[in-house]
Amino acid sequence: MEEKYTIVLAGNPNVGKSTVFNALTGMKQHTGNWSGKTVSGAYGTFQHGGAEFTLADIPGIYSLRANSAEEREAADMISFSGADAVVVVCDATCLERNLSLVLQTMECAERVMVCVNLMDEAEKKGIKVDIAKLSDNLGVPVTAASARSGQGLDELKEAIYSLVTDVPAEHKLTVFPDDIRSALAGFSTSQGGDVENLPAREMILRMLCGDESYIRKAEEGGLLSSSAANRLISAIPQDTSHIRDEVIAAEIRRSAEIAAEAVSFGKCSPYSRDRKLDRIFLSRKTGIPAMLLLLGLTLWITVIGANYPSDLLGKALFGLGGIMSEGLLKTGAPPWLEGVLIQGIYKVLAWVVSVMLPPMAIFFPMFTLLEDLGYLPRMAFLMDPCFRCANACGKQAITMAMGMGCNACGVTGCRIIDSPRERLIAVLTNNFVPCNGRFPTIIAVITMFFAVGRGAANSVISALLLLAAILLGVAVTLLVSKLLSVTLLKGEASSFTLELPSYRRPQIGKVLIRSVLDRTIFVLGRACTAAAPCGLLIWLMANIHVNGGTLLSSAADILDPAGQLMGLDGVILLGFILGFPANEIVMPIIMMTYLAQGSLTELSDISQLHALLSGHGWTVSTAVCMVIFTLFHFPCATTCMTVKKETGSLKWTALSFLLPTATGILLCTAVNGILSVLS
């Protein structure tokens, strides 16, 4: 019978832990190159030596003394999962910092080994790690690897197999000072023999430091009886800060000693290239302009690159719809069924796919390239002063950038923010930055009413105006974040640890696969799920007649007074309301209502669309208000579902819906009033 073992894969953020996981298991688990990217465990399996290993990739942490929900999840996995062994992945380019977690893990797990990853990067920087010396000093097995290229993985598998099949050796290394070690031993003895069932001294230290929740988890896991847990809680000293401080200082000293003996440097400054680039990307003078240039370039490439494939895809899908419609009618199906299935559901899906897929297929890979390069943490560093003024977290800048691809992805990305208050602020304000679904509408309106010139010049102007719209969204995000932090979510900005990883050459192939599968297809699938029932509703409203008109036109007439007050009209407001499942269909609904047709309509070029809108009273003032309301209106159905999932609260989901909507209504009304006076 095949033996089965469970292995926990632990490590600091940015050590390539998830890359090791992918290489061992063959799974395409996302490997983000910025702090805290892995926020939930992933599982995979591999076989070696006739045994099956289940590998658990847990969130990256710096210490078992957790400060966030993700760190607590990882610490508890190491302490209470009952795994057969723990593999701690370290970064060869900064080994000293990683060793603190290794020492802590050795105090609470019976079988521990170390995988020193990124050896190829260390070699490029002139850094040499003596693996044998490191293993001897730690007293646990140590292997070297370069997981991105697959080097050292066979040795790692063999070491894991030997670790779980051999008799575990007692860890001789301890970082506790003599007086702390004596205190721990005395505390353990005084509380009864059943305390000895706990993993090790580090666990008792956590109790001494007042971690009551840990004691209860030990009780739930069967490591402690109820009576022992109660005794431990009652015996926790009032002042334990000095114990923690002394142990942390001892860990730092011991990590430095071990690293000094095992690591040597062939260059005077192995990080000189990173420092030179940081002088550009993190400088007060050039950092922000460089960030805006990268963002503008990304948007320009997205705008230029998406036009042609979107047009081709639209023609192909709508042409297929015509063939399907003809075939369905030939089978004798009633016209209403063809209308529901083809003119309603299929056409909406075809429009969403043709408009949404090409920009996402360009934007997400480019965003992932910046992530793989190591730039995103630097964006958070640059924006942190702005968010600190709003009593929010600089990591919110990363979630905003993710939101430009999809607000649902941005909301999910808010997990990287440790503070629950600041995480909630980021969730509630993520929709203020336009997502991929709103870009086509904004770009079309900008091109028709504001951009001057043709060809490349027109695209540059459109990209610049689009960048200005995004910056407006960022400014409103900061303003609303500040408003929330002094009202519903009062509090000061918390401090946070942000690691700036080394600049790395992006893995183009893996980036493309990861961005398409993990983001593009996932987001597109959720959008289509929401758009299909919307297509049915739109078709019914466009084809059911009451009082000489359709339900669609009647609803637009009802909304017209409110629309006129905002500088829009009832048709535009109806387009946004019916476009709730997917922002991509807002403009097609507006066109369909203006043309009084029973299904979504595709116009051949932008000039025809401009003529249609101008013929129905659109002016520059209407275009300005349209851009504003496209920027600031309720999130789509997919984002609302994601907010509900992340917060677990209908109240916060409703607030995430109302905040941008109220902002858009107020801004449109104010701008319309000002432009009316000036005209």
Image: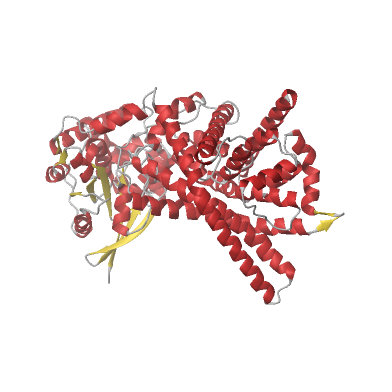
Q: Nearer the viewer, residue 71 or 569?
A: 569
Q: Quadrant of the C terminus?
A: top right
Question: Which residue, as the protein is rendered here, is positioned at the far front?
Answer: 454
Q: Position of residue 331 (x, y in %)?
A: 67, 77
In the displayed structure, would residue 538 be above or below residue 456? Answer: below
Q: Nearer the viewer, residue 34 or 160?
A: 34
Q: How is the image coloured?
A: secondary structure
Q: How many marks?
A: 0
Answer with left or right where residue 22 lies relative to residue 494.
Answer: left
Write the residue at 12% across / 46% down.
132
Write the residue at 56% across / 55% down.
353
In the displayed structure, would residue 117 be above or below residue 425? Answer: below
> Is residue 495 among what the camera can see?
no
Answer with left or right where residue 33 lies relative to residue 549.
Answer: left
Question: Which residue, as the protein is rendered here, is positioned at the far bottom?
Answer: 331
> Is residue 250 among what the camera can see?
yes
Q: Quadrant of the N terminus?
A: bottom left
Write the residue at 77% across / 46% down.
556
Picture quarter containing residue 329? bottom right
Q: Position of residue 57 (x, y in %)?
A: 35, 51
Question: Which residue, as the protein is rendered here, is positioned at the far right?
Answer: 547
Q: Nearer the viewer, residue 283 or 170?
A: 283
Picture quarter containing residue 633? top right
Q: Position of residue 91 (x, y in %)?
A: 25, 42
In the displayed structure, would residue 363 be above or below residue 45? Answer: above
Q: Position of residue 480 (x, y in %)?
A: 58, 30
Q: Nearer the viewer, residue 87 or 572?
A: 572
